């Protein structure tokens, strides 16, 4: 089985949508070995691992790439230290190994992040239990480090934390990422192997099925309005929290859990590393950490009972919960809701085992086959490669003419040397290579005068917006502002103050007339108010 041909755009770089939307009909009319439904990190990982092993693989996503959970995660690539408490040793070990692989293979996109945890009188878990967990964590990672620091030494590393009752502190290492850009980088790598990914293509129904096996799907392109019959030897349902929608009687019961976050200016909550704490009300882990020029505070873990087709949003109760954690841990900073730049909320696909406390539900992934449809759900951002390889192991019996080595490979090909990005500072070159890999050089070359400068208050270069508009299947302004870049949550009011320059750069690239731009801007700003702002701002 040979992969589909790679596609190049007019500027020498691959297009996400080869030849524009006009070629969608031709692509969907082809026969595929694998049809992957869902454009989050799980689906993207499956597309990459399948494509690089010679399968003709197509991914379709009903909204935008990373629209759901994978652009609204906690942005952490971690081994799951807290899962040790629940006895999930296998999940923690797998997560530690995958975290280390991402740190090795995706520098500039996945970066180390120190975590500091204050040791207070009477606070659980106690010092001994925490250090025991870290000893196990270190052993899984094959490393050893000093973890405990006295009170004065710890305060020098975390100067704004509450001093009352502080006995010392514990420090350890995990990692952070830009989750939406991670999805895009995985899709880019899949495309280099011949994989095809189409956004705004929703599956309306499955083709085949009981009494015979599923052999494709009926797909509607939201841009053209046309409906297409897609034929595939195997269909994989990788829609996460939405997995139940393709099953009449799903074999596993999903429990959608919402995790909400606050975004603060970095100057208002200045941190050199993540501060991890146990919430004063219920003992759940909460954190605050520096990310992309801002500070993120999260997360909640509550049952999400609203329509999954509607974007999730933080509630007032969740806002109060996170503010209470800030007031308890950083009392001298007197942070208020007026300091919040933005909020965001995502829905996690967790398997329901009936636990009263949502936080105690396992984060393992599960797979099952029903009428020939292979479904995968659950899991973590960190373990997407391991999940994808597990899917391919289950898929192999359905693809009798395909044989492949399913041992893990490097997640990304090594990018060109930084010397080829001489126009960038060393830090910017590292970021560009991490986010764009082999395309980083072309992105920098496409930048016009002044476009390698950063958007004020962020670490995003203006040139990244031009590149996204030209090459990354942007169909709506929200795609550009919330996922190709993260300006919508990094800047006040969704980045209203910079929309003029964004328009000057991107409108010609997108080919939108003034009426289209005005409509897109109005819809985007309304979305920011309804789903990325504090609840009081929606009233």
Image: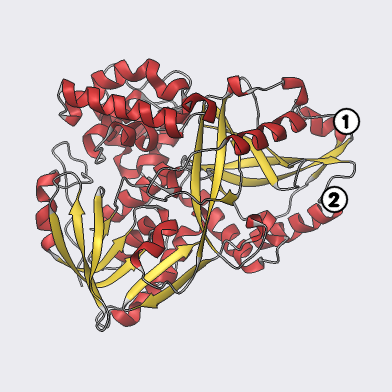
Closer to the camera, 393 or 500?
500
Residue 361: give x, y in percent of width and height: 62, 61
Residue 480: give x, y in percent of width and height: 32, 33
Report the residue at 61% width, 55% height from top.
79
**Left or right of 501 in this view: 244:** right
Residue 433: give x, y in percent of width and height: 39, 39
**Left or right of 444 in this view: 367:** right
Disc 1 to disc 2, C-alpha distance: 16 Å
Q: Is residue 243 visible?
A: yes
Q: Is residue 454 visible?
A: no
Residue identified by numbered label 1 = 164
Mark 1–mark 2 CB contact (< 8 Å): no
**Left or right of 214 in this view: 273:** right
**Left or right of 97 in this view: 187:** left
Report the residue at 62% width, 38% height from top.
317
Q: Quadrant of the N terminus?
A: bottom left
Residue identified by numbered label 2 = 126
Q: Secondary structure at mark 1?
A: loop
Closer to the camera, 229 or 57?
229
As drawn, 474 above or below 367: above
Displayed quadrant of residue 38 = bottom left
Q: Secondary structure at mark 2?
A: loop
Residue 459: give x, y in percent of width and height: 46, 27
Of the image marks 1 and 2, the number of the one nearer the N terminus: 2
């Amino acid at each position: 089985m040979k992969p589909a041909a790679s596609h190049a755009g007019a500027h020498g770089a691959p297009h996400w949508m080869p030849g524009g939307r006009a070629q969608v009909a031709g692509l969907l009319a082809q026969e595929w070995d694998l049809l992957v439904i869902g454009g989050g990190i799980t689906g993207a990982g499956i597309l990459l691992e399948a494509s690089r092993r010679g399968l003709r693989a197509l991914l379709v996503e009903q909204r935008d790439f990373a629209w759901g959970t994978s652009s609204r995660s906690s942005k952490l690539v971690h081994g799951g230290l807290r899962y040790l408490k629940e006895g999930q040793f296998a999940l923690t070990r797998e997560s530690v190994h995958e975290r280390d692989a991402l740190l090795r293979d995706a520098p500039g996109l996945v970066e180390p992040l120190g975590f500091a945890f204050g040791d207070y009188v009477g606070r659980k878990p106690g010092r001994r239990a925490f250090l025991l967990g870290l000893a196990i964590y270190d052993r899984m990672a094959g490393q050893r480090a000093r973890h405990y620091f006295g009170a004065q030494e710890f305060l020098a590393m975390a100067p704004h934390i509450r001093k009352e009752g502080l006995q010392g502190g514990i420090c350890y290492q995990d990692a952070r990422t830009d989750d939406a850009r991670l999805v895009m980088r995985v899709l880019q790598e899949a495309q280099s192997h011949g994989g095809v990914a189409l956004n705004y293509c929703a599956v309306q129904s499955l083709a085949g099925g009981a009494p015979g096996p599923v052999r494709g799907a009926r797909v509607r392109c939201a841009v053209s309005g046309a409906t297409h019959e897609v034929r595939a030897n195997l269909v994989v349902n990788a829609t996460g929290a939405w997995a139940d929608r393709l099953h009449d009687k799903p074999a596993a019961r999903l429990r959608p859990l919402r995790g909400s976050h606050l975004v603060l200016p970095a100057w208002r909550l200045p941190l050199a590393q993540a501060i991890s704490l146990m919430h004063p009300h219920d003992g759940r882990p909460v954190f605050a950490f520096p990310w992309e020029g801002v500070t993120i505070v999260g997360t909640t873990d509550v049952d999400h009972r609203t329509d999954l087709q509607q974007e999730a949003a933080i509630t007032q109760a969740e806002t109060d919960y996170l503010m209470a954690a800030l007031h308890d841990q950083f009392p001298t900073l007197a942070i208020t809701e007026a300091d919040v730049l933005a909020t965001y909320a995502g829905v996690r696909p967790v398997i329901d085992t009936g636990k009263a406390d949502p936080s105690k539900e396992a984060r393992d992934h599960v797979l099952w086959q029903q009428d020939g449809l292979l479904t995968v759900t659950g899991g973590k951002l960190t373990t997407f490669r391991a999940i994808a390889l597990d899917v391919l192991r289950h898929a192999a019996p359905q693809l009798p003419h395909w044989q492949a080595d399913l041992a893990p490979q490097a997640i990304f090909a090594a990018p060109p040397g930084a010397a080829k990005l001489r126009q960038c500072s060393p830090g910017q070159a590292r970021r560009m290579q991490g986010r764009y890999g082999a395309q980083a050089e072309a992105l920098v070359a496409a930048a016009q005068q002044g476009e390698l400068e950063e958007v004020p208050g962020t670490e995003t270069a203006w040139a990244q917006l031009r590149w996204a508009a030209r090459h990354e299947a942007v169909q709506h302004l929200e795609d550009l502002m919330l996922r190709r870049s993260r300006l919508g949550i990094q800047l006040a009011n969704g980045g209203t103050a910079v929309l003029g320059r964004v328009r000057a750069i991107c409108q010609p690239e997108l080919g939108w007339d003034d009426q289209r731009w005005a409509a897109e801007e109005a819809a985007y700003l309304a979305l920011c108010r309804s789903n990325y702002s504090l609840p009081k701002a929606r009233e």
